């Protein structure tokens, strides 16, 4: 059993309204959880994919594929258990505003609160459940996370921006696919595949990078806070907004809003 694109659009409008009615303290707490869940998925996928150098040596695509296959657990937790994710909200709230169920002015409020609290949640997981537990003190993980963090701030600004579009286009399509199924297995598959694709291809997800870059910095990466924010998080965030709000929210609400 599945929902049609029109029915998915109606569902997203309802979710936008629910977010609008959520008290700001609860929204902030859900944002912390969302950031922690994405960081958990990032840590799990990174730990496994980079912990088998013998089997993946000389095959970087296999490392990326393993990481991509495991990373989606974070989005699954947010959608099925509960949490607020900035990148997903770029599509939800634009859809709700276009339909008129939520005001356009709420978008900036929601995005700002959820982006900041996602960052807090990711940092808390980095510090408390990775660094303080001593799980990232040996090779090959230390070198891998340092290389990852330094690589993410070394790319051209426009490259990060474009990769950000690709990442959140796929993340929001994953949310759409998840909503299209009425059964648990279908929802899991719908959420899983597009996210696996974006991670495997190396696109840039601002909230995931709130885990990877700080974790690399905590492990000795030669990255400053200014580099993290300007070289990566800002262009990735702007690209994520375009990928979610324009390529999914605006596009699909235009394509299906008026159809009966």
Image: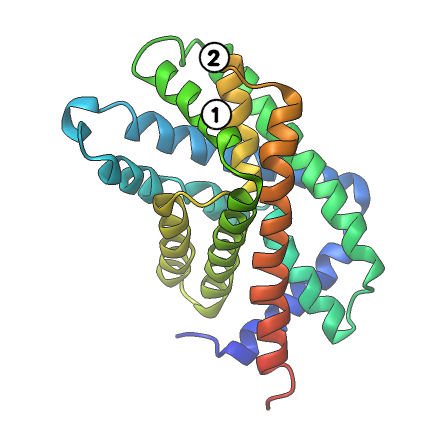
Measuring from the top left, give residue 89's x and y in whole percent.
Answer: 64, 54
Q: Secondary structure at mark 2?
A: loop
Q: Report the mark closest to the observer, 1 or 2.
A: 1
Disc 1/disc 2 C-alpha distance (Å): 10 Å
Name the image quarter holding residue 242: bottom right
Residue 139: mark: none
Measuring from the top left, give residue 146's x and y in whole percent.
Answer: 43, 19
Residue at x 46%, y 48% (from the top left corner): 76
Q: Residue 234: in sight, yes or no?
A: yes
* Horizontal relation, residue 35 to residue 202: left or right: right
Measuring from the top left, give residue 182's x and y in whole percent.
Answer: 44, 68
* Quarter of the image where the C terminus is located: bottom right
Q: Residue 83: in sight, yes or no?
A: no
Q: Can you say whether 152 is above or below 108 in the image? A: above
* Horizontal relation, residue 75 to residue 47: left or right: right
* Horizontal relation, residue 92 to residue 209: left or right: right
Tell me the residue that label 2 is attached to: 219
* Horizontal relation, residue 69 to residue 156: left or right: left
Residue at x 49%, y 35% (from the top left corner): 155
**Dot 1, how many residues are within 10 Å of its Cα: few (below 14), some (14-19), or many (20+)?**
many
Tag 1–tag 2 contact (CB < 8 Å):
yes
Residue at x 53%, y 13% (from the top left corner): 218
Tell me the residue that label 1 is attached to: 149
**Dot 2, how many residues are within 10 Å of its Cα: few (below 14), some (14-19), or many (20+)?**
some
Measuring from the top left, give residue 244's x and y in whole percent.
Answer: 59, 58
Residue at x 42%, y 74% (from the top left corner): 2
* Quarter of the image where the N terminus is located: bottom left
Q: Secondary structure at mark 1?
A: helix
| Residue farthest along the bottom direction in this orientation | 260
> Which mark sits nearer the N-terminus, 1 or 2?
1
């Amino acid at each position: 059993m599945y929902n049609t694109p029109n029915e998915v659009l109606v569902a997203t409008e309802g979710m936008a309204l629910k977010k609008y009615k959520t008290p700001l303290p609860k929204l902030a707490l859900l944002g912390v959880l969302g950031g922690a869940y994405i960081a958990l998925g990032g840590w799990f996928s990174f730990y496994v994919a980079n912990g088998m150098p013998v089997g993946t040596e000389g095959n970087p695509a296999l490392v990326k594929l393993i990481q991509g296959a495991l990373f989606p657990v974070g989005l699954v937790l947010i959608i099925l258990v509960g949490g607020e994710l900035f990148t997903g909200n770029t599509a939800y709230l634009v859809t709700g505003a276009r339909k008129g169920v939520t005001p356009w002015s709420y978008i900036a409020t929601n995005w700002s609160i959820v982006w900041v609290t996602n960052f807090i949640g990711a940092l808390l997981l980095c510090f408390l459940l990775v660094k303080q537990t001593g799980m990232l003190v040996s090779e090959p993980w230390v070198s891998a996370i340092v290389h990852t963090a330094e690589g993410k701030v070394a790319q051209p600004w426009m490259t990060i921006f474009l990769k950000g579009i690709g990442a959140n286009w796929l993340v929001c399509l994953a949310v759409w696919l998840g909503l299209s199924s009425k059964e648990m297995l279908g929802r899991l598959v719908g959420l899983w595949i597009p996210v696996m694709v974006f991670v495997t291809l190396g696109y840039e997800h601002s909230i995931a990078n709130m885990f990877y870059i700080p974790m690399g910095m905590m492990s000795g990466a030669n990255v400053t806070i200014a580099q993290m924010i300007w070289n990566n998080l800002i262009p990735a965030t702007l690209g994520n907004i375009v990928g979610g709000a324009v390529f999914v929210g605006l596009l699909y609400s235009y394509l299906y809003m008026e159809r009966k």
